Amino acid sequence: MPADLVRLLRTALAGLGLALGLAAATPATAAAGLVDAAWLRAQPAAASVIVVDASPGPAYAAAHIPGAFHMDLMGTGARPLPKPELERRLRSWGAGPDSRFVVYDSAGTMWATRLYFDLLLHGVAADRLHLLDGGLAAWKRAGGAVTNQSTPAPEPGRWQAPATGPDLLMRLPAFLTGTGELQTTATVEALNAGYYFGGQRFFDRGGHVPGAIHWPTSDFFNPDGTFKPVAEIRRMAAHLGLKPGQRVQTYCGGGVAATVPFFALKVLLEWPDVGVFVGSQIDWLRDERKLPMTPWARPQMLRDATWLAAWNDEQFRIFGIARLGVIDVRNEAAFAAGHVPKAVSLPAARWREALADPGRLQGELASLGLRPSDEAVIVSEGGLQPDAALAFVLLESLGVTQVSLLMDSVDEWALRGHALTRSAAAAATTPTPSAVPASAWTDLTRPARPLLVKADIADPASTYPRLIWSTGPQAPTITPAGPTVHLPVTELLLPDGQPRPAHEMVARLNKAGVTRWSEVVTVADDPGQAALGVVLLRLLGWPDVKMARP
């Protein structure tokens, strides 16, 4: 196309309010990669800016910003375009060394952030790359014109990618390693709740990568499709337990949705170490090792008889391979009739007595040979029982590293062919030669968020308002002040005490209004029922859950 004709086209489009030119300075209204429609319409036709629509082909064909080029990512699968191909594409748009890029999609979707990621990955400088906040919908609201005519090809530009770009792209080996480094690396899944909790699936297995934090793309956008304020995104990140200095790796089903949390953390919050596992579930699930998936945020909370029988082995204990304590909360008569080998008896009545002052348990737990650095496995009548849940909450409130529940009953244990130990109940409560120093318990570091609170006293560490969840069959005798929802915790369990499928529980909680974007405090006349609520929400990954204490 002749240069004079290109200049005439740019002038005409500028009259429609399109920004195909840009002043030399970085735009004052472009905050950390975002520009709004008013800013884009106001730009003069003085220098090169390349506007790119990342929407799927039919959407672009129906309506797009005049002068916008199209980049259809639907055909690229989970792989970014190779650098030579992307370089060729940018030159075909007339891009040169001084060009800036504004990318957009319809509004509040993942296509613009994916294109942003690809451009950044292949060397477009961050200070010359912008995303139109709110996309085409925001452009229309601002009075911008649209067209269904393709943009004529300009004269080829001279843009050339640098030899190396930023380290943003993760492959399966590095991603897999990161999932096991929970102290330094956070894994974020960007799919909706149906996928994360196993109710929907893209491929052969539902659920999510073990250890992944659920942060779907919809959480990042306002109803109009614009990004939420930076302060709110930072608040959400803190609520989910993410920290600016840690490594964050994002993934989804096919490597597109994962770029939304990437953009929010890397660009808007300016966190230094954020990467995208572009292969996402496609690569994870087709790996020949059959890598695991789970519907639970904390699957390690639930143990079965086969697992416990293996890790409770005498030889494993002698050589220090198995580091666990088994605590039976059934009554003394049931314990004496038959219990899991190496278990100690601490009946439910004792846990209820200690509820007002859990610290009173420390000496008793030490005398029974239990170490807070070991996993504590709670044995009850099977399933999720109120007595076991109360012991779980008290142990976690004391700072025990890992607490889990044996989901099988002692009868099921025996039916599977595992040995039972029978002994006098009195012998189980006397100090043992393996008693540990009391200081092992008194010197514990407590959880950052307490599990036991007074329901009428606000917790300054919480980032969202308090919500009271009444978990008993009826509303509690004394109802704390504040927003309250009533959902009997038994509705989340099957008759045998096993949890309902994760996605069903989440649907019932959402319908009742037990949102994870709150500080949830469970209350019930029976503390075991309140504790069950804590256990279930912890299992599902609710980040700020507590139980009202007397």
Image (cartoon, grey):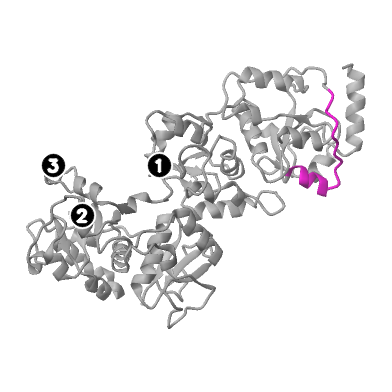
Quarter of the figure with the N terminus: top right
Q: Mark 2 highlights which residue? A: 413
Q: Mark 1 highlights which residue? A: 184
Q: Mark 3 highlights which residue? A: 319
Categorize mark 3 by other alpha carbons within 10 Å: few (<14), some (14-19), many (20+): few
Q: Secondary structure at mark 1?
A: loop
Kind of residue at badge 3 = Phe
Q: Residue at x 42, y 58 (%)?
A: 500
- Return the x and y of residue 303 as percentages of the image width and height: 29, 52
List the single residue furthest toward the bottom: 477
- Return the x and y of residue 46 as percentages of the image width and height: 85, 30
The correct choice, above or below, for 163 with respect to 218 in the image is above
Q: Residue at x 45, y 54 (%)?
A: 502
- Distance Cα–Cα, label 3 vs label 1: 29 Å
Let me know if residue 164 appears in the view: yes
- Return the x and y of residue 451 as percentages of the image width and height: 38, 65
- Mark 3 vs mark 1, foreground winner is 3
The correct choice, above or below, for 190 with respect to 496 in the image is above
Q: Is residue 312 left or right of residue 512?
A: left
